[in-house]
Amino acid sequence: MTLYRSSYTFYMMMIMISIYIWYMIILPFELQTLHTIATFSWQWWGRPSEPPPRRFGYFLHITDMHIDESYLPGATVDSDCHRLPSPSQRSSSSSITLSGKLGTPGEHCDSPIELAQQTLNWLKKEWKHKLDFVVWTGDNARHDWDKKHKRKRKHIYKLNEKIQDMMVETFWPTPDDPRHIPLVPSIGNNDVHPHNYIGGDDDHGILSFYSQLWHNWIPQDQQATFQAGGYFAVDVGRHLRIISLNTMYFYSKNDAVRGCHKPGLAHKHMEWFEQQLVKARSESVKVYVMGHVPPSPRDYRRSCFEDYTRISAAFPDVLKGHFYGHLNMDHFLLFDGRETQMMSSSTNISSSFLDRLTEYESDDDDDLPVVDNGDDQDICINRNINAYVDWLRDMYSSIDPPEQGEQAPVFTPLVAIQVSPSVLPVYLPSFRIYRYEINDNDNDHVIHSGQMMNNNEEENGSAQPHGTLLGYQQYYANITKWEEDNHNNRMPLEYQLEYDTYEAYGLTDLTVESYYQLAKDMVDDDDEPESKHLWSKYIQNMFVQTLNEDLEPSI
């Protein structure tokens, strides 16, 4: 009994000691720990966290490579760079112009394949790892200039297959960069046969050819659409989509189709374009639209130009960029949706707009008209550049400011079209890299007519709406200087930065409002030195540093 009581007393004492230790030592420690955890949790999940850093993406726009399998370095430019000078030409006292190794700027010659290869080599080395996708706006095949070496359908197919192989080799996943980079192609007016012609009764299976060639880039659910019309839509990122148009149906030189206001391929294509934008708006998706021939009253049928501008002006919350090539010059077009609405609703169109509509139409079947460089030799370019520059300046001057006040429309009724210069060295080979906003918290979802856009983020100086273009860098290669310095043919071609839109023009973004302000800053006050300087810089960039503000050769 005594032993039992002693054990009982011992156990009770141990229990009391344990309770005392827990109450006096462990419990305060646990309470402090729980308080710390609760405090930490409140700081992390309860308080608003620091805003994440702004995220940007990059993409390439490359256009008009115009490779020529018959280009021959040292050939005469009179032969379109296809034939070496004859003995009589070599012995002649009169000088002859010969083609360069990587191209012949300012002459009636296409690109050697080596120029396209070295361009893609540089992009692979310097930019591939940063790119999210590639906008590729057509005209891969050479022109049909050489009457002694006519271009046939098989040549167009072969040249497009060659470019396709080069693009795949450049942007395909590798162990070092296993990403799948979307390439988004479109058909150019020199990628069809005959030149400028598609949509007739017999296109000889050309859309089937491109459908198979580009099957890696055209989504499976878009294959039928492409095979029927040569256009498609593809997602290139989260809530970001590209619409690749077949602008040949809108092109005024394509005699195979009718206008956009008559039943046919052009009308159907424009309806599809509008339906895609309605669909994107309902899905809270931002859209870039691209194609070969840029919309303009000079190059589009009037009905198609009206519809394109009207539709684009109605979807500024969805459409974040328009990307085109074809013209070889670096510039932007600015159109007013109010004028095209007037054109659609009235037959009494202002004479000034009709003048602008038709003034620069031409029967020239080439993409490259000429300008005299002062030495009795012609520099081949996209049009009579004096007239084109005058037309461009008139366009910028004629755009009225958006209406202000209570009666103002919800959206700016302007449409900004970006035209990238070519790899083809009409001037010097060039391409551009865009930077765009990636905004995962973009609350600007569905915008309906009469509903204001959510601009709080822009006003607070933080992220812009998803997909907003923030700027681009234009790169070019001085192939003339490269040839002078590269006597042993071992030095790879290097591209260099020509300009950045922020540094050159002070643009903090590439919205239509920023382009409108740039246009007015350049042309509205001829007496202001700053305005003159800005216009001069713009013209030099427009012709890739080969012409000055007086449109005279500068290199």
Image (cartoon, rainbow, N blue to C red):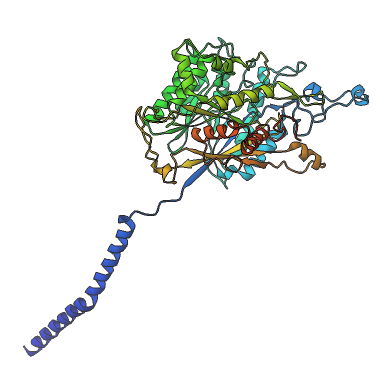
Residue drawn where x is 62% and y is 19% of the image: 192
Locate residue 226, reporting x and y percent: 50, 22
Locate residue 498, reporting x and y percent: 66, 40
The answer to which of 520 and 196 lies nearer the viewer is: 520
Residue 52 vertical placement versus 6 (above, below): above
Residue drawn where x is 51% and y is 20% of the image: 227
Horizontal side, residue 122 vs residue 456: left or right: right
Which quadrant, please, contains the C terminus? top right
Residue drawn where x is 29% and y is 59% of the image: 42
The answer to which of 413 and 182 lies nearer the viewer is: 413
Residue 180 vertical placement versus 370 (above, below): below
All told, the count of numbered labels is 0
Outermost residue, front side: 527
* Residue 117 found in image quarter: top right
Locate residue 34, reporting x and y percent: 26, 66
The answer to which of 279 and 489 lies nearer the viewer is: 279
Locate residue 190, reporting x and y percent: 64, 21
Q: Is residue 224 visible?
A: no
* Residue 95 found in image quarter: top right
The answer to which of 243 and 176 lies nearer the viewer is: 243
Which quadrant, please, contains the N terminus? bottom left
Outermost residue, bottom side: 2
Horizontal side, residue 146 vs residue 62: left or right: right
Q: Is residue 456 visible?
A: yes
* Residue 6 found in image quarter: bottom left
